[in-house]
Amino acid sequence: MKVKITLKELTTEVIIAAIYVILVFTFYFLSFEAIQFRIAEILLILVFYHKRHLLGLLIGTFIANYLGVFGIIDALFGTLATLITLGLLIVLKRQWLIALLIIPPLINGLVISFEISLIYSIWNEYFINFILVFLGEFLVMLLFAVPVKYFIDKSPYLLELLKN
């Protein structure tokens, strides 16, 4: 099976990746703390408009995490968490509100807490880290991603732009 991607589509994915990285580093002080309040995660909603946007989000996640605190380890774990999250969001597209409020916090909570426990050998704090990561991700989804999705859904121009 051949996958064709046009130059316009590729450019769009590169722009999405760049925006993700810019948001992570603009809000660096929030993106890599115990309670990860990663504003860039708002962009996860893009997969509801076209599953191809998974590519830009994965590239952006990998680059941002690679350049962040933990380097390649975070790039691999973070990208894996994003891949699982986006796959589930695509599958649960029809129940987008519930999926958005549960899937990203749950997957990031599980994977990133595992990563933190592995790096620091603090397995006894896994559940605490899970709660902190879950909480940060949940708040970003609730306070920012959900309103942005509603806004996009009400804008015919943005809908057309994101679906192509």
Image (cartoon, rainbow, N blue to C red):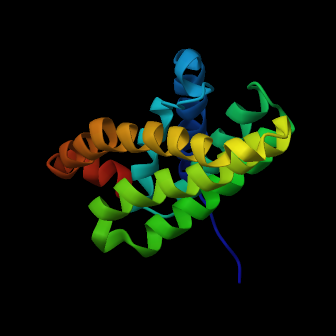
Q: Would you say residue 158 is visible in this rendering?
A: yes
Residue at 73% x, 50% y: name it: 114
Q: Nearer the viewer, residue 6 or 115?
A: 115
Q: Is residue 2 above or below residue 4?
A: below
The image shows a total of numbered marks equal to: 0
Residue at 63% x, 59% y: name it: 83
Q: Nearer the viewer, residue 120 or 144?
A: 120
- From the top left corner, tell me how far across and down residue 137 is, in percent: 46, 42
Q: Quadrant of the N terminus?
A: bottom right
Q: Is residue 162 left or right of residue 19?
A: left
Q: Is residue 44 left or right of residue 160?
A: right
Residue at 65% x, 41% y: name it: 61
Q: Quadrant of the C terminus?
A: bottom left
Residue at 77% x, 47% y: name it: 123
- From the top left corner, tell me how far across and down residue 154 is, in percent: 14, 49
Q: Is residue 3 above or below residue 64?
A: below
Answer with the quarter of the image where residue 47 lies: bottom left
Q: Residue furthest front?
A: 124
Q: Is residue 84 left or right of residue 73?
A: left
- From the top left corner, tell me how far across and down residue 107 is, in percent: 56, 57
